[in-house]
Image (cartoon, rainbow, N blue to C red):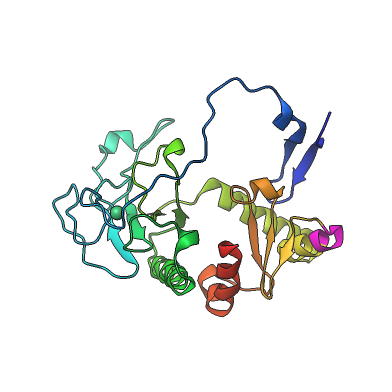
Amino acid sequence: MQGKWEKRWHPLRQEWVVYAAHRNARPWSGEQVQGVKKELPHFDPSCYLCPGNERVSGRQNERYSGVFIFDNDHPVVGPKAPEVAQEEAHGLFRKESAKGLARVMCYDPRHHLTMSEIALSQVQSVFRAWKEQMQEFVAMPDIKSVLIFENKGEVVGVSNPHPHCQIYAVDFHFKLVTQELQAMRNFGQQSGRNIFEEIIKKKKRMRCAWWRTMNTPSLSSPSLRDMRMRSWFFPARTTTLWPRCLAKSWMDWLLFFMR
Ligand SMILES: [Zn+2]
């Protein structure tokens, strides 16, 4: 059988992950999608993200020329989330109001581009805006976790091709992040070392093809084809907060994203 097939210990998740690369060669009789890129207009009058257009909420987008951020009209979390009855706030199936902030960030006013197609200076603006958003959330005591993500492509159900991402800032800790931070603390207490520095050292020693080190950040991924889905980014310089790290080294990160 072609490809590796083994269990791999995930030092941050603290659990085994089965790696079964040979399964990529299994027969597939399901749906197949051709990677044909549709011709899109620079501006779409029916797009709720294009400059000057009206959104479903009735609000009008600014006639923006760079990055544009607004509160999501259909937020998953928000300050106006419905209150939950007091009697439902306890017990095995307890509920709470879904407070937080949900925003949409357009990378560029042009409807037909993706991040890899916009100018480097504009990508810099996107990174700067991510950093500023994070700094804003860090100053909010109620915000405990932030997720910035982009769903991309019709195939995964994205209804609008305009280059944009979502930002969720929530008032609870994401379990995965909590787990990883606990793994970091446990490793530090047991060994007196920083787990991220150890991971960087070991990966460098393994000389994996998919391991790259820039001037400041480092990247690790189980395989090149998975890089976009499962990548670890570590600052080579120890820092307390991602926004502060970016202040020094975000250009390197940016260039990495552009590859
Ligand atoms: Zn658009």
232 on left or right of 145: right
Above or below, 164 against 215 in this view is: above
Residue 206 falls within the magenta-colored stretch: yes
Q: Residue at x 21, y 65 (%)?
A: 62
Direction bottom: furthest residue: 248
Q: Quadrant of the N terminus?
A: top right
Q: Position of residue 24 (x, y in %)?
A: 70, 32
192 on left or right of 52: right
Q: Residue at x 61, y 49 (%)?
A: 179
Ligand 1 located in image quadrant: bottom left
136 on left or right of 52: right
Q: Position of residue 220 (x, y in %)?
A: 70, 57
Direction top: furthest residue: 29
Q: Residue at x 33, y 48 (%)?
A: 77
Q: Position of residue 132 (x, y in %)?
A: 41, 71
178 on left or right of 96: right
- The answer to whether residue 176 is seen in the rendering is yes
Query: For residue 234, which quarter of the picture?
Result: bottom right
Q: Quadrant of the C terminus?
A: bottom right
Foreground residue among 83 and 118: 118
Direction right: furthest residue: 205
Q: Position of residue 236 (x, y in %)?
A: 69, 71
Above or below, 206 against 5 in this view is: below
| Range shown magenta | 202-207
- The answer to whether residue 20 is seen in the rendering is no
Above or below, 77 against 21 in this view is: below
Foreground residue among 52 and 113: 113
Q: Residue at x 41, y 32 (%)?
A: 91
Above or below, 159 against 44 in this view is: above
Direction front: furthest residue: 39
State whether the magenta stretch is mostly helix, strand or loop. helix
Query: For residue 159, which quarter of the picture?
Result: top left
